[in-house]
Image (spheres, rainbow, N blue to C red):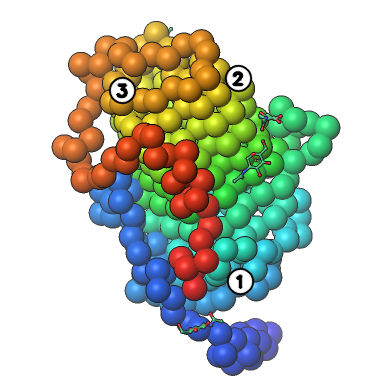
Amino acid sequence: MLWKKSATALLFATGAASQNTTCKHCDESAHGFASLNGGTIGGKGGRTVFANTWNELKDYASRNGSLIIRVNGLIKSETRGYEIPIASHKTIIGVGKDSGLVGGGFAVKGTRNIILRNLQVSDTRIPEDWPGKGEDWDGIQVDTGFNIWIDHMKFARMNDGLIDLRRDSSYITVSSCIFSEHNKALGIGWTTNITAKVTINDNFFNSTNSRNPSADNLEMCHMYNNYFRNCTSYGTYARGHTSLLVEHSYYDTVFDPLVAGPNASIKANWIKFKHTEGEALLDVNSKKVFKASDYYQYSLRDPYDLPNDIPYFAGPQAEIGS
Ligand SMILES: *[C@@H]1O[C@H](CO)[C@@H](O)[C@H](O)[C@H]1NC(C)=O
Ligand SMILES: *[C@@H]1O[C@H](CO)[C@@H](O)[C@H](O)[C@H]1NC(C)=O
Ligand SMILES: *[C@@H]1O[C@H](CO)[C@@H](O)[C@H](O)[C@H]1NC(C)=O
Ligand SMILES: *[C@@H]1O[C@H](CO)[C@@H](O)[C@H](O)[C@H]1NC(C)=O
Ligand SMILES: *[C@@H]1O[C@H](CO)[C@@H](O)[C@H](O)[C@H]1NC(C)=O
Ligand SMILES: *[C@@H]1O[C@H](CO)[C@@H](O)[C@H](O)[C@H]1NC(C)=O
């Protein structure tokens, strides 16, 4: 049995020999809060493998040790809504612009040092369940996970959250992603502890009804260069004891673009509002808010450029995974 298993693996490796086992951007590491606490390098230093099927993706994602997994094409989940668990020290990166996982998602449960890049994750939605209450079929669900970089992904039409970062998950950066056509985009919290540190930059929140994000009890939530368009219920919500620094952002056609609960604090730095209504809280106990440049370097874009630049640069890109 064991012999047979390794023979199959060998056969697969031989069959895949014509595929490139390196890629230009497979070794990149995270910026923002994911660059602290030892850094987020994913599978750097490990082997590079190709996942062409859902079973290969599931298998590689669960392996021990460092591994760079290149997802080749759009893989269909064989179990609708199943969230593939990811073990520590993995990079999962899409080849080209049109790779990803359809009909399922990913889960991080108590593991660390994980990079997800250049993938579309979409379409677990049950058409008659727009609120997404019936099934918990997230794009990525993270429970007590550390050092995670989610970059150039596109999340759309799931059932429940596009990304849920829960139970003290921390040192996470979400950058250059598209969140689209959904009720609950990005939720952070599900804890009474105030420890989470999250960076959210250069993302496009497009026709996302709520949670852009909903950030509950974050010690530090740093958002910059984000573009929000058509968020019908609310935009960015600092809940619990969250400390939110929001910089150089553009809210277009958003109801309640910036809201805070009674114990939260918000500091804003050059926010552009267009066709917005309701609450736009720019200073809520802002003296309590942290200074991001004490922790890492970052560069701010001109908010007026965001409607043109962000939809173009966010989401999967041909050159990243090739
Ligand atoms: C392999 O790499 C070469 C050189 O970078 C590139 O031209 C080719 O398209 C790549 N093939 C695949 C399957 O990625
Ligand atoms: C992975 O490593 C852990 C801890 O060293 C071990 O308990 C587990 O059996 C390993 N799993 C596999 C699939 O090798
Ligand atoms: C809060 O932190 C404590 C101590 O680390 C831990 O036991 C508890 O599970 C955490 N609570 C939640 C909701 O994660
Ligand atoms: C933005 O949302 C609209 C639906 O409101 C959709 O038609 C369009 O494809 C989305 N754009 C992107 C880049 O996802
Ligand atoms: C705005 O988003 C909602 C979903 O929240 C969608 O039903 C509607 O079609 C979108 N409007 C436009 C103009 O894209
Ligand atoms: C505000 O924080 C205090 C102290 O943690 C807590 O007792 C109170 O319930 C909080 N208020 C709200 C509205 O959450």
Residue beneath disc 3: 268
Q: Residues within 10 Å of mark 1 (few under 14, many from 20)?
A: many
Residue in the picture at 76% in, 55% down: 79
**Marks 2 and 1, the one that precedes in the sequence:** 1
Location of residue 60 (image quadrant): bottom right
* Identity, as a three-letter code, of the amino acid under mark 1: Asn
Residue 22 visible in rendering: yes
- Taking 240 as reference, is 209 above or below it? below
Left or right placement of residue 25 versus residue 300 in this view? right
Residue 32 place in picture, x, y as percent: 30, 46
- Residue 169 visible in the snapshot: no
Q: Earlier in the sequence, mark 3 or mark 2?
A: 2
Ligand 5 is within 8 Å of the C-beta of the residue at disc 2: yes
- Say which label, 1 or 3, has the lower sequence index: 1
Is the residue under label 1 in contact with that under label 2 (CB below 8 Å)?
A: no
User: Residue 28: image x %, image y %?
Assistant: 35, 64
Q: Amino acid at mark 2?
A: Ser
SS category of the residue bearing label 2:
loop
Mark 3: which amino acid?
Ala
Label 2 CA crowd tier, 10 Å (few <14, some 14–19, many 20+): some
- The residue tagged 1 is 72
Which of these two is toward me, 203 or 75? 203
Q: Which residue bears the numbered disc 2?
A: 233
> From the viewer's perspective, is 130 left or right of 112?
right
